[in-house]
Amino acid sequence: MAKEKQAPQAGLLSPLAADFTLFGGADAVLLIHGFTGSPAHMLKLGTALQQQGFTVRGVLLTGHGTRAEDMLKASWEDWLSDVREAYDAMAAAFRTVSVAGLSMGGVLSLILAAEKQPACCVTCSAPMGISNPFAGAAPLIGKILPLLPKRKKAADQLLDPDYDIGYDVIPTPRLTDLKTLIRMAKERLSGVRCPVLCAQSQKDPDISKDSADVILAGVSSARKEKLTLTQPLHVITIGPETDTLFPAVCRFMLDCTKENP
């Protein structure tokens, strides 16, 4: 099964930062990357899902994958519009559509799940609260330091460098947009009725430790599961525990699509 040939996207950090489609069968999966990240963070998971027969699209969110300055011009409305449009296009073309997202992508996945009721929803490191100490003062700090260098963590050495493609700074004003999306997702959790799988490291340094529990307690889904990883990482889709994460996601999505004949 081949990757779709698409027109080159100008100014990308890497070809792997592009929006991608992996062709499979009639059941599809929309993959959504996180805040300051790119589709490269989702490509390995996408390949695993394609090998199980899914058609997979990894969407590139507005302002991402190019220059950090481009994120300063974007907003939560843009990102929500991006994933709504991608989902609707897939829903018109495929038998079923599932959604999965990393970090902010997981938050967007939950909002989509409440609105669209996909075959299932998978969140990876989706925050219900964030640990960034600057988040509360983002509007003020953003006027002084709009691009804030990210703190280096020793555990980042565990990430696959070939796919770790994103910004090394935080567009500070956009932290307010991230918080807005988190609030929206929390308010809509009870509207999520599709099956939900939440994957999270118990040592995730970037989000509140109870995030997965908050999600699972809030959704109305009859089927809801939690996968706990152990490495102190946030970008778990390119970490050393993908041999646990990817089979769990694939099994969950296969089961859920079988329940939607």
Image (cartoon, rainbow, N blue to C red):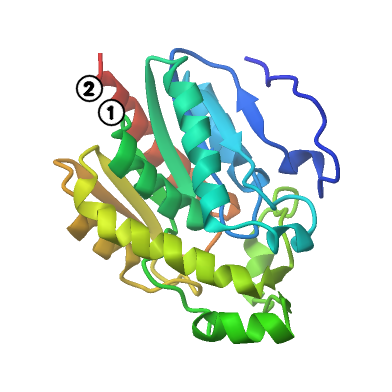
Q: Which residue is mark 1?
A: 256
* Picture quadrant of residue 28: top left
| Mark 1 element type | helix
- On the image, the x and y values in percent for residue 120 come to 31, 35
Q: Amino acid at mark 1?
A: Cys
Q: Residue at x 70, y 59 (%)?
A: 73
Image quarter (top left, top right, bottom left or bottom right) of the C terminus = top left
Whether residue 229 can be seen here = no
Q: Badge 1: how crowded within 10 Å, few (<14), some, or many (20+)?
A: many
In what quadrant of the picture does the N terminus appear?
top right
* Residue 163 as seen in the image, left or right of residue 99: right
Residue at image point 33% right, 66% down: 211
Amino acid type, label 2: Glu
Q: Name which residue lies at 49% across and 29% down.
A: 49
- SS at mark 2? loop
Q: CA distance from mark 1 to mark 2?
A: 5 Å
